[in-house]
Image (cartoon, helix red, strand yellow):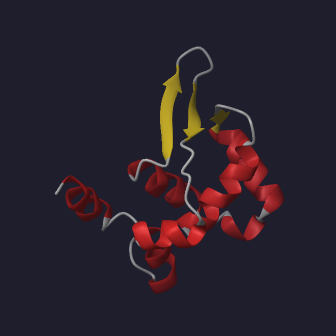
Amino acid sequence: MPLATYNLLKEIFGKRKELRTDEIVRSIAKKSPRDMDSLLINLDVLERMGFLLKRFDMKKNTYLWSLREIKLTNEELLLKYPLLYEQSLYGIDPLSDVKEFRKSKKS
């Protein structure tokens, strides 16, 4: 579930501004191995929704991720961004509703 991944990322990032993909994967594998199956999908969903920013670092030859701090409780996040919860709960393809979500935010 993207919300669970977001909460794990908040712990992992701590005070760090950026992490490499391999650092995120290793940290989540240690903290919550059951979330590894959907990790990359959840990272993509969180990036598309604006919770994560990704850039490619040519010197390090890797992607660097930064976390946007959202000052909402989990309940407020779920009310404002139901997509964070629905896709894993009901088995909906995590990327299918992202375009609709972005369209609704623009309106």
- Relative image position of residue 64 (x, y in whole percent): 58, 32
Q: Nearer the viewer, residue 80 or 94?
A: 80
- Relative image position of residue 11 (x, y in whole percent): 75, 51
Q: Residue furthest left?
A: 107
Residue 81 in sight from this viewpoint: no
The image quadrant where one finds the N terminus is bottom right
Residue 52 vertical position relative to residue 17 in the rendered view, above or below: below
Give the side of residue 5 with respect to residue 82, left or right: right
Give the side of residue 36 with respect to residue 99, left or right: right
- Relative image position of residue 9 (x, y in whole percent): 67, 51
Q: How many marks?
A: 0
Q: Nearer the viewer, residue 58 or 106?
A: 106
Residue 15 in sight from this viewpoint: yes
Q: Which of the 4 image quadrants contains residue 66?
A: top right
Give the side of residue 9 with respect to residue 90, left or right: right
Give the side of residue 63 with respect to residue 87, left or right: right
- Relative image position of residue 34 (x, y in whole percent): 72, 71
Q: Which of the 4 image quadrants contains residue 18?
A: top right
Taking the spot 48% from the left edge, 30% from the top edge, the residue there is 55
Residue 78 vertical position relative to residue 46 in the rendered view, above or below: below
The image quadrant where one finds the C terminus is bottom left
